[in-house]
Image (cartoon, rainbow, N blue to C red):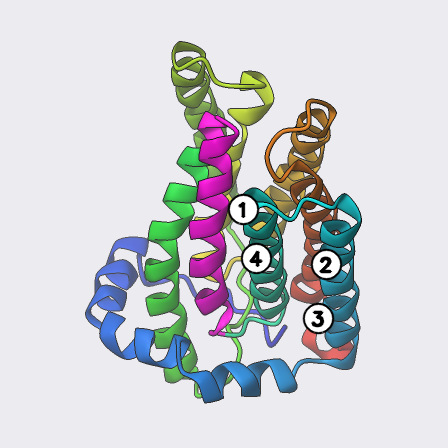
Amino acid sequence: MDNYSNNSNSSFTERFSTALRDLPNALGQVFNFQRNVHELKTLKKSTKVMMTIMLLATWASFILGKDFGFSGWIGVITGTSVVLNLILVDQGRLTNYSWGVLGCVVWLIIAINNRLIGDIASQSFYLIMQFVGLSVWHREITQADQEEVASRKLTWREGIFWFLATFIIYFIVLFFSKHLNGVQVYLDATLLPLGIVGQVLMTYGYRSQWIAWITLDVINVVIWFNQLQVVSPASTSMFVLQIIMLANAIYGAYLWFKPSDQQ
């Protein structure tokens, strides 16, 4: 990532409202075909290697799993979209959101088919936040006249706030998951709070997002391994995807936490 920035004078609310006004311009840039191609072509060599491995693993699991029905194809489309989204997030590229929108939509379909209440809530939240995020990132990148979003540090007060928020949201989701007869409710209920924290921190360029993502990905590996045991829809592709996402989160944390002069 580029230079760290500790400048957090603008409040979340101010930046949110400003970003929404810029939404039409941001959408044009995010879904611009030429920009999407350019931002993939100009990734670091190490990132391209990571992307290739992740895509090969995604498609290999689909082919070896022999699930060529509707759910199987939805699973592999989700995997491909998520891989490209994550790789572009690793380097702070704006077009990650074009793949993020697609990934959220198809993942939501899979979560509904598997009755994972927490995952359904998480993906619905992610989908909304894609549009908030692309507006904020577009504004930050345009103002800085750069191709990548700069990494920020949380203050200790902000860190405590988000830590407590995670637990509060967890117990709220757990309550509703139990009453809606969800599957793996204690694990599944962690997805939304961790996702909210990770997504908000990502939207505003905070590197601590990766702590939330790594924790969430570890839990997702366990959840989809359990789903794999009961042969649920698209479980093979989704299980492999969780392992891929965990590996990527570790790589992303490395890029965002590493000082720019060492990259």
Q: Residue at x 27, y 59 (%)?
A: 16
Distance from Cα at disc 2 to Cα at disc 1: 15 Å
Distance from Cα at disc 4 to Cα at disc 3: 34 Å
Q: Residue at x 68, y 51 (%)?
A: 245
Say if mark 1 contacts mark 4, CB within 8 Å. no
Residue 129 at what x, y percent from top left? 37, 53
Q: Of marks 1 and 4, which one's residue comes earlier in the chain?
A: 1
**Mark 3 belongs to which amino acid?**
Pro
Secondary structure found at label 1: helix
Q: Of marks 2 and 4, which one's residue comes earlier in the chain?
A: 2
Q: Which residues are magenta?
A: 94-119
What residue is shown with label 4?
Answer: 77
Compared across the picture, whether 178 is left or right of 151 comes to left
Secondary structure found at label 2: helix
Q: Residue at x 47, y 24 (%)?
A: 170
Of residues 71 and 91, the one nearer the viewer is 71
Q: Residue at x 49, y 25 (%)?
A: 167
What residue is shown with label 1?
Answer: 70
Q: Of marks 4 and 3, which one's residue comes earlier in the chain?
A: 4
What residue is shown with label 3?
Answer: 259
**Mark 2 belongs to which amino acid?**
Trp
What residue is shown with label 2?
Answer: 59
